[in-house]
Image (cartoon, rainbow, N blue to C red):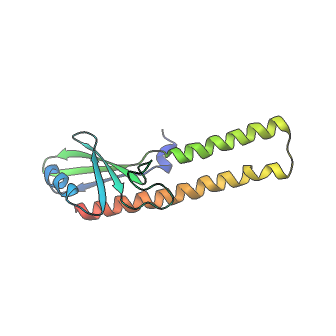
Amino acid sequence: MGAFNRILLHRQIVIRKPADIIISKLYSNNDFKVKKLNDENYKILAKISFGVGSSGILFDGIKVYLTFTRDGENTILMFTTRLRIELIFLMLLEVIFIIILLSTGVSELSLWPLGIIPVCIIWFWAVYRYQENSLADDVEAYLK
């Protein structure tokens, strides 16, 4: 998981309020959706996602996982993301193209997937990461 820590969001902040107040404030917003996973873990969903499905339609869209840790009168919030299935699909597609190219022989026409798919992976990762960071920034600003 160490290599994924560089490409996934892991951000921790401390808010000088009790967790109960922060959690109730979290549910009173109009900018994002909140799904409770358990007492300390929540899934925050963007209402608008560019390049992916919107929240509640087929996929969750842009999401950030939020973990609350109580520390006396302070609350530690940990924002995290997971590797998106779309990126995994593109990586598998690249592997399939490489296997096909190696088994059938290489021609100039067949080399384009080797170049375009990695560019797509980087592009989509950048778009997802930007939106995930924006969502985490919005939640952080709202809760402070």
Q: Position of residue 49 (x, y in %)?
A: 44, 60
List the single residue furthest toward the front: 57
Q: Which residue occupies 49% across, 40% down? A: 2
Q: Which residue occupies 24% across, 46% down? A: 68
Q: Position of residue 138 (x, y in %)?
A: 32, 63
Q: Is residue 77 left or right of residue 74?
A: right
Q: Is residue 50 left or right of residue 106?
A: left
Q: Position of residue 64 (x, y in %)?
A: 37, 51
* Quadrant of residue 47 within the rendered picture: bottom left
52 is higher (above) or lower (below) than 92: below
Q: Position of residue 144 (x, y in %)?
A: 22, 63
Q: Nearer the viewer, residue 50 or 64?
A: 50
Q: Nearer the viewer, residue 2 or 91?
A: 91
* Quadrant of residue 100 within the rendered picture: top right
Q: Is residue 73 left or right of residue 51?
A: left
Q: Which residue occupies 25% across, 39% down? A: 38
List the single residue furthest toward the top: 103
Q: How many marks?
A: 0
